Amino acid sequence: MSFFKKLVRSTAPDTKAGTELLKGNEDAQNAPPHPPTDEMFSTAGDYGLQTLSENAGDIIDIIFVHGLTGNRESTWTEKTAKVFWPKDLLAKDLPKARIITFGYDADIIRGLSTAGNGTLRDHGKALAEDLAIRRKRTDSALLVSRGSAQQHVKDLLESTVAIAFMGTPHLGSNIADWGHPISKLSNLLRKTNSEVIGVLQPGSEMLAAVQQEFYTMLDDRSRNDSKYINIFCFYEEVGYTGLGEIVPKQSAILTAYPNNGIHATHTGMTKFKTAMDAGYVRVHDQLWLWYNAVEESQDAWKEKKDVAKRQQRLLQPVSVAESDRGGTPYRGPVFNGPIYGRNVTSGTQVTGGTANFNFS
């Protein structure tokens, strides 16, 4: 289970991370803000994008992506209290964030129906392309044709500033050890997606390849214009009777990045009843740090832009009317203030572009 936060419109504060956020997102600053909508965008059914919170002036997008056997709503919903916390809690705490969930066919072993055969790459590609086009349609309405689909996805990557992983099996999952034979047995009765389970087995070559590509991407981002992506990993602290932890800590963390535990099972670590739940506080606080950096960076960018506008106005040529000069109209800078020296008449306004005064 994981979700990531992506910057849509932002610039940087004076911090190192903020400076890195600035460089990839100045184009987004010039795009018109998406207007408030009476009905927020959502695909029908369980698959695709679902917008939970959207307001004019939003500065970031936060996208929630569930894991295997998950759902774009139930994964994040505490059933007893019926709290869908991305919508019911987080949207109130981070009011300038557009919050979106993404759903895909993650049921690798269905009851009586046929499981989907999409691979992890297929699902990742669908997320990237859906989100890239949705951003473009929202920010620039009918300007989708300005760039290729590949360029939209590239822009999406360059705008991503942080990823929070929640129980994500970077090194595989214990559940795959028994899930794989179960899926083989199930194939006798119906089609299952054993390929996805195989990828998640500890030691999987495909999983190792995906991890290497991910690290390469992070390294490229940090080397090229210092476009650093913030990473934080959460891991489960409570196992299941007879099974233990679904994703052990050593698989859920990335050693080069910070991490923290949530005192819950694998499925429980993504569900919170109230804003005071310890797990929610930890997740919220981490998101707030990134959210706050984005907000500060936007304020700094606006101030920088205002200063540039003021400087530009000062350098604009000023037209001096003929009636004011008693001669031919002239466009050029106006020198205000008294000028003293020989051959200068007191009280005379001096105008001109390049003016040479000989005071001897």
Image (cartoon, helix red, strand yellow):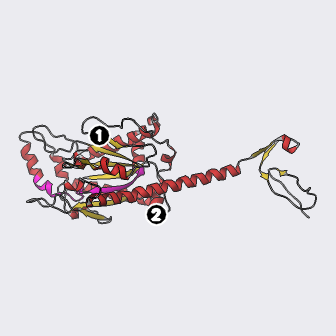
Q: Position of residue 341 (x, y in %)?
A: 90, 62
Q: Are marks 1 and 2 in contact (CB under 8 Å)?
A: no
> Mark 1 highlights which residue?
48
Rendered residue at 16%/51% (across/down):
198
**Amino acid type, residue under disc 2 in the picture:** Lys
SS at badge 2: helix
In the rendered structure, which disc, 1 or 2, sits on the residue that comes first in sequence? 2
Q: Is residue 274 left or right of residue 136?
A: left
Residue 204 belongs to magenta span? no
Q: Residues within 10 Å of mark 2 (few under 14, many from 20)?
A: few
Q: Position of residue 249 (x, y in %)?
A: 21, 64
Q: Give, as a single range, the part of the protein colored magenta.
A: 157-178
Q: Is residue 304 above or below residue 250?
A: above
Rendered residue at 12%/51% (across/down):
179
Q: Is residue 30 above or below residue 257?
A: above
SS at badge 1: strand
